[in-house]
Image (cartoon, rainbow, N blue to C red):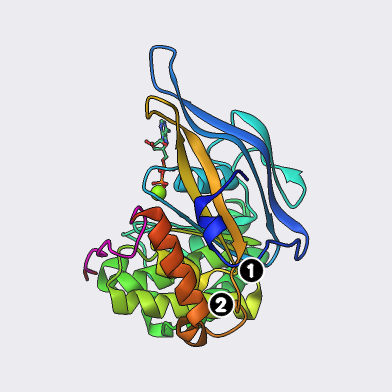
């Protein structure tokens, strides 16, 4: 971590090694070819360790590399240099330890909610086993599991037969989280998962995910560019900032702030009333000059 204007102005809540590392990034670099032998550097010498059970919110201006960071953890983008490991294992290809929830369009539109939830687990059962006795009982277990996940996400058993277009945007995101949980991920990656929801729906979804974390202590890496959302949800808050060279060209994002957010154990309602957390929001907004403030209006939710 380099010198940080934000960190200097913040009270000290240092990051401590709370438990075993879940994600370790050591001297990571990621560059994309952009034609004519040129490359675009997204990360350069990125060092970051995320511990098991943390709720990490990653905040940063649009285009600084937040989604790319999640895609590296997921195994979709390979780092150009450096080491990336999940629970001590190097990431090679798609990493099954992670569940992924994007902003929208993660559900198959032509499948029911139940079929969407069952799809991942059923893919793990080869095509020939499907019609055996074991296959049938497995499908029964998947159904039971899917109904439990729907309930956990505040949906009804009757929603299982619906198609995504019959659900509101908020309900679709509940199904998307349930879908990610079906594979029992050790790490849940959420990329602007609530950014397309209206403010009320969004607040409800924040409480839901915060409760999920309090109950299960699943490691969550939650990307957002909303400061309030990050400070209210996170047990640890990381701010990424784009570094630029003398000519103003981007030369890779760096960790500008990395700190434990106090009172993570409290309910979200209690945290929202905490002056310390509101103070953190204000300080980040003041020092980021609005680059990722809550000022951005979310798109209205559509049915
Ligand atoms: N496959 C790719 N090839 C080239 N550039 C890419 C690719 N994927 C992402 N980028 C660039 O990387 C930068 C970071 O993108 P992204 O991670 O989506 O940012 P964020 O999620 O923070 O808004 C952007 O400038 C984007 O254009
Ligand atoms: Mg993004």
Relative horizontal placement of residue 92, taking residue 196 as reference (left or right): right
What crowding class fits label 2: few (fewer than 14 Cα within 10 Å), some (14-19), or many (20 or more)?
A: some
- Classified by dominant secondary structure, the portion drawn in magenta counts as loop
- Tag 2's secondary structure? helix
Residue behind mark 2: 212
- Tag 1's secondary structure? loop
- What is the spatial separation of the Cα atoms under label 1 and label 2, in whole angstroms? 8 Å
* Mark before the other along the chain sequence, 1 or 2: 2
Residue behind mark 1: 218
**Residue at (31%, 59%) from the top-left corner?**
109
Relative height, residue 203 to residue 131 (above, below)? below
- Image marks 1 and 2: residues in contact by CB distance under 8 Å: yes
**Residue at (38%, 24%) from the top-left corner?**
247
Query: Which quarter shows the N terminus?
Result: top right
Q: Which of 7 and 85 is in front in this view?
A: 7
* Image location (x, y in percent) of residue 149: 53, 76
Query: Which quarter shows the C terminus?
Result: bottom left
Relative height, residue 215 to residue 49 (above, below)? below
Q: Is residue 269 visible?
A: yes
In magenta segment, residue 55: no
The magenta-colored residue range is 290-300
Within the displayed image, which quadrant is ligand 1 positioned in? Answer: top left
Relative horizontal placement of residue 203, taking residue 263 as reference (left or right): left
């Amino acid at each position: 971590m380099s010198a940080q204007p934000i960190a200097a102005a913040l009270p000290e809540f240092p990051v401590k090694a709370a438990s075993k590392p879940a994600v370790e990034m050591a001297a990571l670099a990621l560059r994309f070819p952009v034609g004519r032998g040129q490359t675009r550097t997204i990360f350069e010498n990125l060092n970051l360790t995320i511990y098991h059970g943390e709720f990490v919110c990653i905040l940063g201006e649009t285009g600084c590399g937040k989604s790319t960071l999640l895609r590296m953890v997921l195994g979709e983008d390979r780092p150009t240099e450096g080491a990336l490991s999940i629970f001590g294992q190097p990431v090679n290809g798609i990493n099954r330890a992670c569940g992924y929830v994007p902003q929208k369009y993660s559900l198959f539109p032509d499948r029911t909610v139940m079929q969407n939830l069952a799809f991942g687990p059923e893919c793990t059962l080869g095509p020939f086993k499907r019609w055996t006795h074991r296959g049938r009982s497995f499908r029964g277990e998947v159904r039971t599991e899917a109904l439990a996940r729907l309930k956990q996400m505040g949906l009804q058993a009757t929603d299982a037969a619906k198609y995504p277009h019959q659900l509101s945007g908020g309900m679709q995101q509940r199904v998307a989280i349930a879908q990610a949980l079906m594979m029992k991920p050790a790490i849940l990656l959420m990329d602007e998962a609530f950014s397309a929801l209206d403010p009320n729906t969004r607040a409800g979804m924040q409480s839901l995910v915060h409760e999920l974390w309090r109950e299960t202590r699943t490691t969550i890496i939650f990307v957002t560019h909303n400061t309030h959302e990050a400070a209210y949800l996170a047990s640890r808050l990381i701010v990424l900032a784009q570094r630029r060279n003398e000519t103003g060209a981007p030369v890779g994002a760096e960790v500008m702030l990395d700190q434990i957010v106090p009172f993570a154990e409290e309910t979200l309602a209690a945290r929202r009333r905490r002056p310390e957390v509101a103070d953190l929001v204000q300080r980040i907004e003041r020092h980021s000059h609005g680059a990722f403030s809550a000022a951005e209006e979310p798109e209205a939710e559509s049915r």
